[in-house]
Image (cartoon, grey):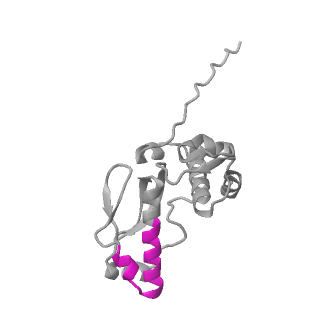
Amino acid sequence: MRTPSRPRAKVKQRVPRTEAQYAATPETFKQTWDRVIEAISNMRSSKVSLTQAARDARVSPRTVTKWGKSALRKGKSGKYVVKKNDNLLRELRFPTPEGDRHIAVRGSKQASFLGEYSNALKLYIQTGDATKLAEFEGKSIKGANGEDVPLLVDREVLDRLASAGRVSFESIYARTA
């Protein structure tokens, strides 16, 4: 005679707040989370609706509202709109003298700051114009764990990395959904 199976305990997934929490999540959740972040970023940068941003990110609007609700609010029309800033965790990529590094940051402001740095870096690598890059001299990015990581602006090191093909501009996001 077969013994009845016990129902599996459902593990409640929570919004990751630290790099360790994000790293401990299953791969399928990481993919979903990255798509939610992508949808919210698209809503903010392209000024598209939740439905359109979710469709573009290949995730349901319901999933975006479930996991990204702290970045959204209901507008006067009753539709969700994105807030000016958010505090959601993102895993981003940027160059160091040793090569690319991944860092988890909290919030859209940190992600935008790293995006501006990436644009300045791209301009320097493609044209040799270091004026925008000089604006990042002595600046750092703050990780979700509180660590301040200095941004690389040493042109000699950047030239070496670029000539070795170790600088990439596809996306600052460490993982692409």
What percent of the width, then of the height, locates residue 24? 47, 42
Task: Please tell me in which quadrant of the rendered image residue 110 appears.
Answer: bottom left
127 part of magenta stretch = yes
What percent of the width, then of the height, locates residue 66? 61, 40
Which sits in the foreground, 81 or 31? Answer: 81
User: Quadrant of the image for the C terminus?
Assistant: bottom right
Dominant secondary-structure state across the stretch colored magenta: helix
User: Residue lying farthest top?
Assistant: 1
Query: Is 14 on the left or on the right of 133, as rendered?
Result: right
Task: Please tell me in which quadrant of the rendered image residue 128 appears.
Answer: bottom left
- The region drawn magenta spans 115-135
Query: Is 177 on the left or on the right of 117, as rendered?
Result: right
Point 67% across, 15% down: residue: 4
Q: How many tags in the picture?
A: 0
Q: Is residue 166 visible?
A: no
65 w.r.t. 104: above or below: above
What percent of the width, then of the height, locates residue 165? 46, 78
130 w.r.t. 137: above or below: below
What percent of the width, then of the height, locates residue 105? 42, 54
User: Residue lying farthest front?
Assistant: 76
Task: Please tell me in which quadrant of the rendered image residue 157 appears.
Answer: bottom left
Point 35% across, 74% down: residue: 135
Which sits in the foreground, 163 or 63? Answer: 63
Point 41% across, 86% down: residue: 129
User: Quadrant of the image for the N terminus?
Assistant: top right
Q: Is residue 165 visible?
A: yes
Which sits in the foreground, 51 or 98? Answer: 51
Point 47% across, 67% down: residue: 115
